[in-house]
Image: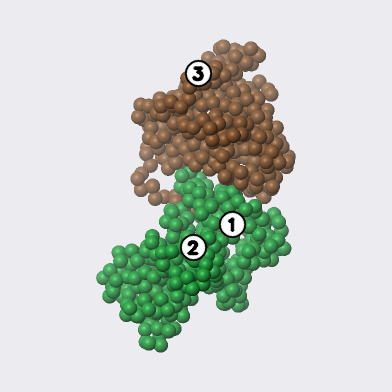
Amino acid sequence: MGKMSISKALGSAMAEEMRRDTNVMLMGLDIGQYGGAFGVTKGLFAEFGQDRVVDMPISEAGYVGTAVGAAATGLRPIVELQFNDWITIAADQLVNQAANLRYMFGGTLSVPMVLRAPCGGYAQAAAQHSHSFESWFAFVPGLKVVLPSTPADAKGLLKAAIRDDNPVIFLEHKKIYDLVGEVSDDPEALIPLGKADIKREGKDITIVTYSFMVHKALQAAEILAEDGISAEIVDLRTIKPIDTETIINSVKKTGKALCFQETWLTCSVMSEVSAIIAEQAFDFLDAPVKRLGAKDAPIPYCPALESFVLPSVDDVVAAVRAMV
Amino acid sequence: MDAGLKKRMYTDMLRIRRFEEIVGDLFAKGRLPGFYHLYIGEEAVAVGACSALKPTDYITSTHRGHGHVLAKGAETMKMMAELYAKATGYNKGKGGSMHLAAPEIGILGANGIVGGGIPLATGAAFSARYLKNGRVTVCFFGDGASNQGTFHESINLAAAFNLPCIYVCENNLYGVGTKQNRVRKVADIADRAAGYAIPGVIADGNDVEAVYQTIKAAVDRARGGEGPTLVECKTYRHRGHFEGEPDTYRSPEELEEWKAKDPIKQYTRKLLAEGIVSEQDLGEITGLIEQEMAAAVQFGEDSPYPTPESALAGIYA
């Protein structure tokens, strides 16, 4: 065990998996000599060289598509997009190709690739560098979607994603790259995809959430505890496949659910979670399921405007108080 | 080029032609679901190109892919069964005409996205270079696809990394229903190669030996570590973009002009003149092909459909 940041934990996961399997390799913008825009791949170029840590041209569709073809023919590429926002440029490669190839081809090949990208706001990076599109890709059969919230989860989930034989979209919130926590140094310590985690036990309300918002929920829970409100926090970790069992077990216990995410609510992950709870835990609910997320606006530049659009700890506290 | 290769190329072109004619006929009779984009008229490109490849080399194909797939070594029975949507098809009935795939013989799929195979082929070439397995990849695409952004991105990437990929543009003058000279100023797609600092070569797409020689040279370059080539084959499709299309956007004169250059008619005359085949040989070849196609159709007709529940299998590995 050791203490390290999410950034270091991710780098450690990639290094371990690259030592274990020579077919694991990296592609992305500025990941090699530069060490990555957020420093996540620092040190990997020095250890593994330019053939395994490959700097790409600014051609998101071209190099993500190349990764798909390489994955279909024997490699296990980890492709980094510099910002999740630009996943749109590569979306055809992910949705019409990567998600479909195994199925369309009758199971005669698979696409074992991981697409990693920094996501999220609260950085005054405005509308083309602040978004998070996990809900679009969770929609598509054939893809898996993962968002870790802690260093231990980041490392274990990334290792599992790399060993998964399917295309996995792995989004890392840019505001928690420097968050430090305990991390296993056991190279076989994987965290399975498709399993949520109870980050805080409670009995009065379930807050289902993921990624950076886990930490806002934890802060809100501390504040609420002072008033005797006990909030249970379910960290989804994997958005697709989603851990329905853990969500429902929690709601059965507490009887109330706040579905909390950073991004827009329309057709979102938490819209999906709300539907699951309504369908499967209706008899256990003491109140309607509520969603909390960003207001329906592109992310603005001005800090006060960004704070207005994106949810805050106070928003979580207020939402819970209105429900209990 | 030895006589055996010439006869094989002739035979494969005729196999493609007959397969496509039969598919067109079956579709018109309502025996086949889905949509068909037939390769009739372009046979020399697929056959010339694939004849220069080993079984372990890769190809990516297009929505007009039956010719590529057959030329690369696919079995007509399993192809036909897939068109019939039967469980015995190459894709277990899950893909159909536009997605025919046989990775075990290097066929990384026909693709329903125009240009969809271009990044995939680049990736196959990338893995071949990484794994040092000596394989090359031939990427088939049309002149319409050469306007896709991923054409630019993929070839730039392949050139920069010296990837063993041969980009084969089948320029048949049309992208779906639009004559491409209305939407593209460059007349010769091969000229685009200069923009990536790779060789761009034009071949007569109706001359199977010319296609073979051109692509063989590009394959040797790639296998020798000298990187990608862009090969443009001038060709023409005798049928519409898809079966059932009125094809009112092409003039009958243009069609007749190209039909006069039919690659199979040309090659028949050439092989007879050279004494590589006799009239009797041609009769035997034709007879065997008719038997093969009849067996393929029977296999398609007789095979079972996949179960409806199998729709949920094979999504994830």
Q: Measure the C-alpha gap from mark 3 to mark 1.
A: 50 Å
The image's mark for residue A79 is: 1
| Frontmost residue, B82 versus A42 | A42
Question: x%, y% of residue A81?
Answer: 58, 58
Which amino acid lies under the numbered mark 1 shown in the image of this protein? Val
Q: Earlier in the sequence, mark 2 or mark 1?
A: 1
Q: Chain of mark 2?
A: A
Q: Say whether residue B71 is visible.
A: no
Kindly report which numbered mark, 3 or 1, lies closer to the viewer in this rendering: 3
- Circle 3 is placed at which residue position? B253
Percent x, y of residue B296: 45, 29
| Vertical comparison of A7 with A139: above or below | below
In the image, A197: left or right of A205? right
Mark 2 element type: loop
From the image, which quarter does the N terminus of chain A lie in?
bottom right
Q: Amino acid at mark 2?
A: Ser
- In 3D space, how far apart are the residues under numbered discs 2 and 1 (Cα atoms)? 17 Å
